[in-house]
Image (tube, rainbow, N blue to C red):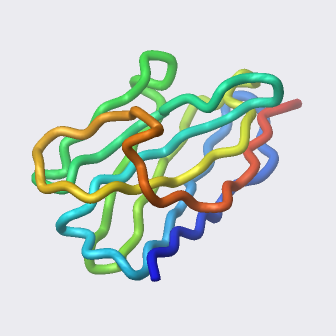
Amino acid sequence: QLQLVESGGGLVQPGGSLRLSCAASGFTLDYSAFGWFRQAPGKEREGVACISSREGRTSYTDSVKGRFTISRDNDKKTVYLQMNSLKPEDTAVYYCAAYSNFQTVCVMTPTIFGSWGQGTQVTVSS
């Protein structure tokens, strides 16, 4: 059974940092690409970052480039999202997602992702 469980969300002040974790079970991580998405109230779900199955190549949406870092530890079956210099507009529910592939590229199109976590709330506020 494929399962993704996010953790690490919370309340942080502007300029602060959080690290989200996504524990994967039932996956062969070597053949899975992962992504982080977020959805704020009243807004559509947007892709934040993704990491490919081969070579761990990454891609980011423009608004988080230079502030967020996605990484993976296949031995621990965990994907991370390190978020620095957080801004109030980063406030959202963050979701981890995965799809099967064996490529050096990844995409952040939500419909491609077949497995999703339950989400974790991130609130950036003073």
Image coords of residue 110 (percent x, y) = 47, 38
Q: Nearer the viewer, residue 62 or 29?
A: 29
Image coords of residue 72 (percent x, y) = 32, 60
Quadrant in which residue 88 is drawn: top right
Horizontal placement of 52 versus 6: left or right? Answer: left
Q: Which residue is at 18% across, 68% downward?
A: 30
Image coords of residue 60 (percent x, y) = 37, 29
Q: Which residue is at 19% across, 42% downward?
A: 57
Residue, far right: 126
Q: Nearer the viewer, residue 118 or 68?
A: 118
Q: Which residue is at 55% across, 29% downward?
A: 46
Image coords of residue 48 (percent x, y) = 48, 33
Q: Which residue is at 34% across, 55% downward?
A: 99
Is the C terminus in the top left, top right, bottom left or bottom right quadrant?
top right
Check the image and report above or below for 29 versus 88: below
Horizontal placement of 121 versus 7: left or right? Answer: right
